[in-house]
Every structure is written in structure tokens, then in C-alpha cells.
Amino acid sequence: MKIAVLAFLLLLAVSHGEGLKCHCSGNSGCSGNVQTCYNSNDLCASVIIQAGVNFFQRCMSREECRDMNRPPVTVYCCGYDLCNR
């Protein structure tokens, strides 16, 4: 029984150790097309700025997603791998 509990806890720790993966593009400063999110950046975001018709994708915190989503900026946030297509 102890081994089963220990194995479950180990599996749980490993599964939470991997960060969310998001598409990354535009003026977001990423080094590749996919970014791994860390710390408080727990969502994937697609951001559209209508004023200059700019668009970018990256990891973002819940607070950033909420605060940036005001005209002329539209932010779409989601919480699973590569969902910000």
C-alpha cells in the first residue's frame, strides 16, 4: 500500500513539473514558435491590437489576460497546451 501511495505522489509531482506550452509569435520576444510557461504565466494568449492591426501569441498570467482585455486590445486566453492558435 505504501508503495502505491508513493508511486502516485511521484507521478503527481512529475505531471505538475512540466509547464504549459503555448504558440509564440509576433512581437513577443520568443526564441522559437513554441514557448514553455513558467511561474505565474499559467495561460496561453493570443492578443490582437486593432489600432495598428498587430497580433502576438505568448504565455501570460491571468492578471495580464484580464487587464489587457480592453479596447482597442482583444485578448483570448486558454489553459491547455498549444490552445492559442
Image: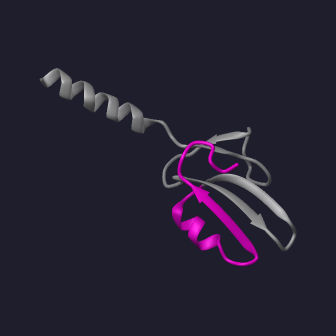
Above or below 79: residue 17: above
- Write the start and end of the magenta stretch as one range: 60-85
Q: Quadrant of the N terminus?
A: top left
- 26 on left or right of 1: right
Q: Is residue 14 magenta?
A: no
Query: In the image, residue 72 lies at what x, y percent?
Result: 76, 76
Instruction: Specify how the rendered protein is coloured.
Output: one colour
Q: Among all residues in the image, which is located at the extreme right?
A: 52
Toward which corner of the image does residue 3 lie, by quadrant?
top left
Tally the numbered discs: 0
Please report the residue visible at 74 percent of the width from the left and 49 percent of the height from the top: 29
Query: In the image, residue 8 lies at what x, y percent?
Result: 26, 29
Toward which corner of the image does residue 4 lie, by quadrant?
top left
Query: In the image, residue 44 lies at what x, y percent?
Result: 60, 52
Please report the residue visible at 67 percent of the width from the left and 65 percent of the height from the top: 75
Please report the residue visible at 76 percent of the width from the left and 64 percent of the height from the top: 48
Q: Among all residues in the image, which is located at the extreme top?
A: 3
Q: Is residue 77 magenta?
A: yes
Above or below 28: residue 49: below
Above or below 53: residue 15: above
- 8 on left or right of 34: left
- 65 on left or right of 9: right
Q: Among all residues in the image, which is located at the extreme bottom?
A: 71
- 2 on left or right of 38: left
Query: In the image, residue 84 lies at what x, y percent?
Result: 66, 51
Please report the residue visible at 79 percent of the width from the left and 54 percent of the height from the top: 27
Q: Nearer the viewer, residue 43 or 40?
A: 43
Q: Nearer the viewer, residue 78 or 20?
A: 78
